[in-house]
């Protein structure tokens, strides 16, 4: 026969597990992100790379990323989870990136963000400054 103390302990443990599962489910609810526009993308990039100048900026048509030229570097901004990550790659790598089905795929060589997929109408752009 089960003792009353054992049943109380099992019920308390079950309630604690249920509370932790509920907390984990609630914590995974992502906040909605507004699509990027030129001003927001520029703000995020300049915040992440202070002191850099942005020569040209291309924002993804779906608002989920951006690519900027800053001298000999490309500054990449892409959505990851419920936020954005910013990475820097060589400009030559960005211009040579694969462009298929309206998407440019950039290899970031980073464990946390291995690649960025940015939706653009065409790449490289016709207005690309030398």
Image (cartoon, grey):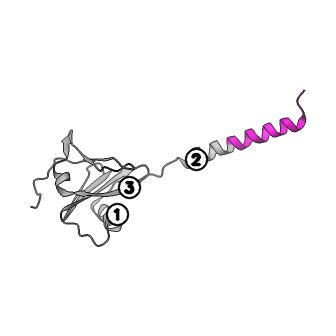
**1 or 2: tag closer to the N-terminus:** 2
Residue range of the region highlighted in magenta in the rendering: 1-18
- Residue 77: x and y in percent read 31, 56
Badge 1 density bin: few <14, some 14–19, many ≥20, Cα 10 Å: some
Picture quarter containing residue 20? top right
- Identify the residue at image location x=35%, y=65%: 48
Q: Nearer the viewer, residue 9 or 59?
A: 9
Q: Give the left or right position of residue 127, taking residue 115 as reference.
A: left
**Dot 3 corresponds to which residue?**
84
Q: Quadrant of the N terminus?
A: top right
**SS class of the residue under badge 2?**
helix
N-terminal of the pair, mark 1 or mark 3, is 1
The x, y position of residue 70, in whole percent, is 21, 64
Q: Residue furthest top?
A: 1
The local secondary structure at tag 3 comes to strand
| Mark 1: secondary structure | helix
Question: Looking at the picture, does residue 123 appear above or below residue 11?
Answer: below
The one nearer the camera, 54 or 30, is 54
On residue 71, the disc is none
Residue highlighted by disc 2 = 26
User: Where is mark 1, residue-wise?
Assistant: 44
């Amino acid at each position: 026969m089960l003792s009353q103390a054992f049943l109380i302990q099992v019920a308390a443990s079950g309630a604690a597990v249920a509370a932790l599962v509920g907390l984990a489910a609630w914590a995974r609810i992502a906040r909605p992100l507004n699509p990027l526009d030129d001003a927001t993308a520029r703000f995020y990039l300049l915040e992440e790379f202070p002191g850099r100048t942005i020569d040209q900026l291309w924002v993804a048509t779906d608002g989920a990323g951006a690519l900027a030229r800053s001298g000999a570097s490309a500054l990449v901004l892409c959505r990851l989870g419920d936020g954005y990550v910013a990475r820097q790659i060589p400009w030559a790598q960005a211009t040579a990136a694969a462009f298929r089905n309206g998407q440019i795929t950039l290899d970031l060589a980073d464990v946390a963000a291995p690649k960025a997929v940015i939706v653009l109408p065409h790449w490289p752009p016709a207005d690309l400054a030398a």
